[in-house]
Image (spheres, rainbow, N blue to C red):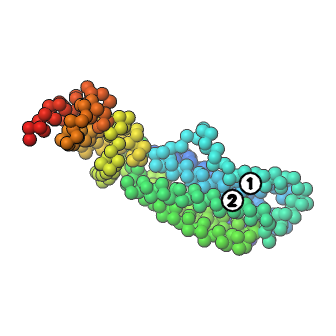
């Protein structure tokens, strides 16, 4: 009987956190809405299994005459919700109204087919199935558990590597003037992955709905307690600090020195190893996508740390590369225009202009000067 009250209490707790996240003003409004949806799914699932559990324990089988076990569908929507939440936190906000979003629903197809099958049974057959599934288990539930224990780990592992990649850059992300510490998310995902690995054998060993309910509720309550312990009414789920506007009026954000240094190191390493500036189409959006540092953060780092804009930053790398070519033994084999194209400039005039800006010489003059040494 204790499980009956635990499921009800859990459902109410999840519903309360859902409401809190929805009404709270936060810089992570979109992310909060997504994680709130996750807790709403948990709440609905808990209410459904509580109703089913109570009816079976109390012998009130007539209450199940019109009950359909759609709780599994809500379980399958939880992992995609967590994935979309992490995308939003990492400034890679998903676009919901796209066809590819429907791919997340593919694992629910076996559960939908299963529910159609349950609907095709007579009421007496349906109740008999519920009783058997609760006590000894059924083939259908085992098959559905295989789908569930395949889908959830895949999402958790993807989320883990996304967070791990961001933590290598910095434990902080900036959203709408607020710096957020996401370091706690790594442990959160490790806990979830570990729980899945431990619970999967138990689920298939006991192979009945009673065990599924206990495992499901335990998993959700661990998430609830961990997230709630990280959450306060004042600053949401994250440890936050407000960052100030850039004083000269530029639309960039002033971030803390630690974060700026981390981003600058990442940018420098990427530029020196990958040399994206050799591509004429290299732009701020491309660099942002490749380094997973937002456009505003890149602009801020360049303005504050290097006192230059993105165009000057890229051109300096291109000029240094062109100087190496002009100083090489193969310089005479290339025209000035071809050499400029090799270094990422779109035209001879833009190459000449940029080169003279940084060296006070044209490329031809620089080449000639090298011959005198």
Residue 202, how many percent across, how many down? 67, 72
- Up the image or down, 201 lies above or below 241; here it is below
The answer to whether any part of residue 15 appears in the image is no
Q: State which quadrant residue 100 falls in.
A: top right
Q: Position of residue 254 (x, y in %)?
A: 31, 43
Q: Measured along the vertical axis of the image, is residue 269 above or below residue 131?
A: above
Query: Which residue is the site of mark 2?
Result: 147
67 sits to left or right of 37: right
On screen, residue 42 versus residue 305, left or right, reads right
Q: Residue 187: give x, y in percent of width and height.
A: 48, 64
Task: Residue at 69%, 69% (x, y): give it.
Answer: 203
Q: Residue at x 87, y 64 (%)?
A: 128
- Residue 79 or 370: which is nearer the viewer? 370
Q: Which image quarter is the N terminus in?
A: bottom right
Read off the residue under disc 1: 110
Verify CB contact (< 8 Å) between mark 1 and mark 2. yes
Can residue 91 be seen?
A: yes
Query: In the drawing, does residue 286 fall left or right of residue 143?
Result: left
The span from disc 1 to disc 2 (Cα, nearest Å) is 8 Å
Crowding around mark 1 (Cα neighbors within 10 Å: few <14, some 14 to 19, many 20+) is some
Residue drawn at 91 percent across, 56 percent down: 122
Viewer-closest of 62 and 181: 181
Which badge, 1 or 2, is on the more N-terminal residue?
A: 1
Query: For numbered disc 2, what is the local secondary structure?
Result: helix
Circle 2 residues within 10 Å: few <14, some 14–19, many ≥20: some
Residue pushed farthest top? 349
Front residue of 308 and 327: 327
Q: Element at badge 1? A: helix
């Amino acid at each position: 009987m204790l499980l009956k009250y635990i499921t009800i209490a859990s459902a109410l707790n999840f519903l309360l956190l859902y409401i809190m996240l929805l009404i709270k003003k936060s810089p992570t409004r979109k992310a909060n809405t997504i994680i709130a949806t996750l807790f709403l799914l948990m709440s609905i699932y808990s209410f459904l299994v509580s109703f089913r559990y109570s009816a079976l324990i109390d012998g009130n089988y007539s209450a199940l005459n019109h009950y359909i076990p759609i709780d599994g569908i809500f379980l399958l929507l939880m992992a995609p919700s967590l994935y979309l939440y992490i995308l939003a936190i990492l400034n890679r906000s998903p676009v919901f109204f796209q066809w590819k979003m429907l791919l997340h629903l593919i694992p629910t197809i076996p559960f939908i087919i299963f529910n159609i099958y349950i609907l095709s049974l007579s009421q007496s057959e349906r109740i008999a199935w519920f009783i058997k599934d609760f006590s000894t288990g059924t083939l259908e539930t085992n098959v559905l558990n295989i789908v569930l224990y395949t889908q959830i780990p895949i999402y958790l592992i993807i989320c883990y590597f996304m967070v791990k990649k961001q933590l290598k850059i910095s434990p902080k992300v900036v959203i709408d003037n607020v710096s957020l510490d996401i370091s706690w998310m790594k442990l959160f995902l490790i806990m979830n992955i570990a729980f899945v690995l431990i619970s999967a054998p138990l689920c298939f060993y006991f192979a009945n709905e009673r065990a599924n309910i206990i495992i499901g509720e335990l998993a959700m309550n661990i998430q609830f307690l961990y997230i709630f312990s990280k959450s306060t009414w004042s600053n949401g789920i994250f440890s936050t600090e407000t960052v100030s506007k850039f004083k000269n009026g530029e639309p960039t954000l002033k971030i803390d020195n630690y974060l700026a240094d981390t981003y600058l190191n990442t940018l420098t390493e990427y530029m020196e190893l990958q040399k994206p500036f050799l591509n004429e189409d290299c732009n701020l959006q491309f660099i942002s996508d490749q380094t997973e540092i937002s456009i505003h953060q890149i602009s801020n780092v360049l303005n504050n740390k290097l006192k230059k804009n993105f165009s000057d930053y890229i051109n300096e790398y291109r000029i240094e590369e062109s100087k190496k070519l002009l100083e090489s033994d193969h310089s005479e084999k290339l025209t000035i225009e071809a050499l400029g194209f090799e270094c990422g400039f779109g035209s001879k005039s833009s190459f000449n202009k940029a080169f003279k800006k940084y060296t006070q010489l044209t490329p031809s003059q620089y080449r000639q000067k090298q011959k005198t040494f």
